[in-house]
Image (cartoon, helix red, strand yellow):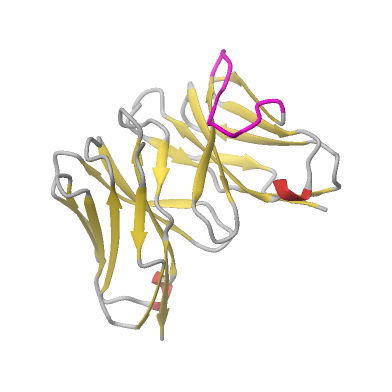
């Protein structure tokens, strides 16, 4: 059974500092890994999706890396802003891509102005 | 990008009543939709997989008679919480898998259910 873990559970940084969020998964046979953002009381916003054949994906200030063999993914957010404050979730599909997702517990991020 | 809507966005009901939540794919067809539940400060947990034209598949520990799922068309799945109790209060989120691109699923904005 796939288990997804995110450490730390919460993170508080001053504005401008880089953020490093970690995600680990127990079964390395994944099709892809996805990072989401969730604001309080809201749904999910997809940030980045990394295919199993990729090592990293970048979008603006966001960069996500994937190391399947070690069962890890890291989301980097450069030059953090107060607007980056949210909960960040990683998830992997069960079986084929597009299947039901197993989510990590999330990391709650607070960027202080 | 593709849009998934949920209705209602927020509902408050009395204990013992039934509540229906709709999940619609607005600009694409979805033979498969997923229903997740999220308790406060916790992550999303899959409840069931909704399949158009057939019975839903429930995750272990989820009561199928309590959480009725109907996927009557390629753009609509409904989740009915029957005889709701306070412990059913949660944030319910659906996602829909694009029939034209089955590697991709899109999430709805969620429904906040509060049972008094």
Q: Is residue A77 above or below residue A23?
A: below
Quarter of the N terminus of chain A within the rendering: top left
Instruction: Decide if residue B10 is on the left or right side of residue A82.
Output: right
Q: Is residue B2 above or below residue B97?
A: below
Q: Quadrant of the C terminus of chain A?
A: bottom left
Residue extent of the magenta highlight: B52-65
Q: Of residues A37 and B45, which is closer to you in this image?
A: B45
Residue B18 appears in which quarter of the rendering? top right
Q: Is residue A74 magenta?
A: no
Q: Is residue B56 magenta?
A: yes
Left or right of B11, for residue B53: left
Q: Which residue corresponds to the image point at 41% horizontal and 28% vertical from the top-left?
A: B98
Residue drawn at the location 14% of the way across and 39% of the way down: A53
Q: Position of residue A55 (x, y in %)?
A: 13, 49
Using the rendered image of the protein, determine whether residue B1 is visible from the camera's viewpoint.
Answer: no
Q: Position of residue A95 (x, y in %)?
A: 32, 29
The spot of residue B32 in percent (x, y) is 48, 25
Looking at the picture, how far across and down is residue B49, in whole percent? Answer: 51, 28
| Residue A11, visible in the rendered structure | yes
Depth order, front residue of A105/B22: A105
């Amino acid at each position: 059974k796939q288990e997804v873990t995110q450490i730390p559970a919460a993170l508080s940084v001053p504005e401008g500092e880089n953020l490093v969020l970690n995600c680990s998964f127990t079964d390395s046979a994944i099709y892809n890994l996805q990072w989401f953002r969730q604001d309080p009381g809201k749904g999910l916003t997809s940030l980045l999706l990394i295919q199993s054949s990729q090592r990293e994906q970048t979008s603006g200030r966001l960069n996500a890396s994937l190391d399947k063999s070690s069962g890890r993914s890291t989301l980097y957010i450069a030059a953090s802003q107060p607007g980056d404050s949210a909960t960040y979730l990683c998830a992997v599909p069960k079986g084929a891509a597009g299947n039901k997702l197993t989510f990590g517990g999330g990391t709650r991020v607070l960027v202080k102005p | 990008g593709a849009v998934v809507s949920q209705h209602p966005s927020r509902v408050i009901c009395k204990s013992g009543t039934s509540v229906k939540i709709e999940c619609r794919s607005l600009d694409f067809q979805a033979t498969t939709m997923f229903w997740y539940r999220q308790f406060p400060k916790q992550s999303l947990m899959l409840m069931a997989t909704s399949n158009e034209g057939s019975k839903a598949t429930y995750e272990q520990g989820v009561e199928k008679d309590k959480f009725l799922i109907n996927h009557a068309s390629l753009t609509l799945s409904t989740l009915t919480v029957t005889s709701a109790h306070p412990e059913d209060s949660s944030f319910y989120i659906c996602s829909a898998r694009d029939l034209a691109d089955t590697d991709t699923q899109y999430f709805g904005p969620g429904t906040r259910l509060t049972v008094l």
